Amino acid sequence: MTDVSDGVLHTLFRSDQGGHEQVVLCQDRASGLKAVIAIHSTALGPALGGTRFYPYASEEEAVADALNLARGMSYKNAMAGLDHGGGKAVILGDPERIKTEELLLAYGRFVASLGGRYVTACDVGTYVADMDVVARECRWTTGRSPENGGAGDSSVLTSYGVYQGMRAAAQHLWGDPSLRDRKVGVAGVGKVGHHLVEHLRAEGAEVVITDVREDAVRRILDRHPEGVSAVADTEALIRTEGLDIYAPCALGGALNDDTVPVLTAKVVCGAANNQLAHPGVEKDLADRGILYAPDYVVNAGGVIQVADELHGFDFDRCKAKASKIFDTTLAIFARAKEDGIPPAAAADRIAEQRMAEARPLR
């Protein structure tokens, strides 16, 4: 048995991060598609989660990412009050090089073969136009364009939910939800991050940004010649003096053994999934007096939006539900204080309780 198989089987069957109901490896040689669909739980309903299109360094890395992301979606959907379990898919490869209509159609056929156990949507590397193509082969597709019966760009409400999480953190830590004159560092100003900057500037926050793409940074600076500055990279951002809030809005693992000791911010609240690089980081944050708003709680606005699409999309209804992320985040901070545990552990307990109570009696 190969090392890759050993790693996958260990994660699925013999680790605390496992417990997934189903993992599907997909390949279509004609289009070049290689994908992984991971269904973590359907306790609350059909698994719902986006499709990530990314040039992974290895197949093992891709599978591990799918497993982690799917598990995170179970907790996210539970905390968002949705009647959905957690699932996620990843397509291996550089979307700038290999993404084609044929590949997306082939992927849609694989999702359709699951008969509704998994509902897909956009994620890193996939967009509304891509979901329109996938939907031609699969009716269990959300994140489509309004012209094709969908809700459009889910990053709008994702950023709004993160903004509500920041307000809750400010209320808990400083006794006032206002972010006016707070200094907020945003790492990643792409699909979600640039909307988040708009919310922050509208309230009068000072914003420091960074992104690996110079054009993304330039777009923000051109739009906001005052109140926004840029630094070279994330390493510089997390060390910025006077930072009140740090918002990781790119890929996961942003909070790790190297970054947590040098963070200057008092709050971490961002849109990226799986921000904690490994178990124990949440305690390291708490030991340093840094308030962590669990990522899967505050970034749930997007999944709230795409879930609503299955029932006939209404933006105002979705925004009202995403606004409740403020109250949910405050409740997590209160539970953490009451139980004497980090907020991430408190959120897990609440989500696990909801999933356990939803399981049918045998």
Image: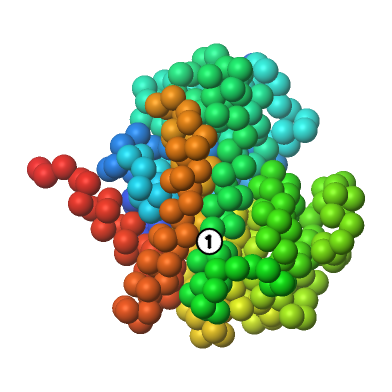
Q: Position of residue 248 (x, y in %)?
A: 65, 61
The quarter in which the C terminus is drawn is top left
* Whether residue 359 is situated above or below residue 314 in the rendered picture: below
Number of numbered discs on residues: 1
Residue at horizontal 59%, vertical 73%?
A: 267
Q: Quadrant of residue 187?
A: bottom right
Chosen colour scheme: rainbow
Dot 1 crowding, Cα within 10 Å, few <14, some 14–19, many 20+: many
Q: Quadrant of residue 271?
A: bottom right
Q: Quadrant of residue 133?
A: top right
Q: Position of residue 40 (x, y in %)?
A: 38, 44
Pick out the residue farthest to the top: 136
In-front residue for pair 87/312: 312
Is residue 82 toward the left or the right of residue 63 in the image? left
Is residue 182 toward the left or the right of residue 8 in the image? right
Is residue 285 at least partly visible in the picture?
Answer: no
Label 1 is placed on what type of residue? Gly
* Whether residue 332 is situated above or below residue 258 in the rendered picture: above
Is residue 211 at least partly visible in the picture?
Answer: yes
In-front residue for pair 266/113: 266
Residue at horizontal 31%, vertical 37%?
A: 45
Judging from the image, what secondary structure is the residue with disc 1 in? helix
Residue at horizontal 61%, vertical 24%?
A: 145
* Whether residue 166 is situated above or below residue 82 in the rendered picture: below
Q: Which residue matches tag 1? A: 165
Residue at horizontal 41%, vertical 32%?
A: 118
Q: Position of residue 329 (x, y in %)?
A: 44, 63
Q: Position of residue 39 (x, y in %)?
A: 40, 40
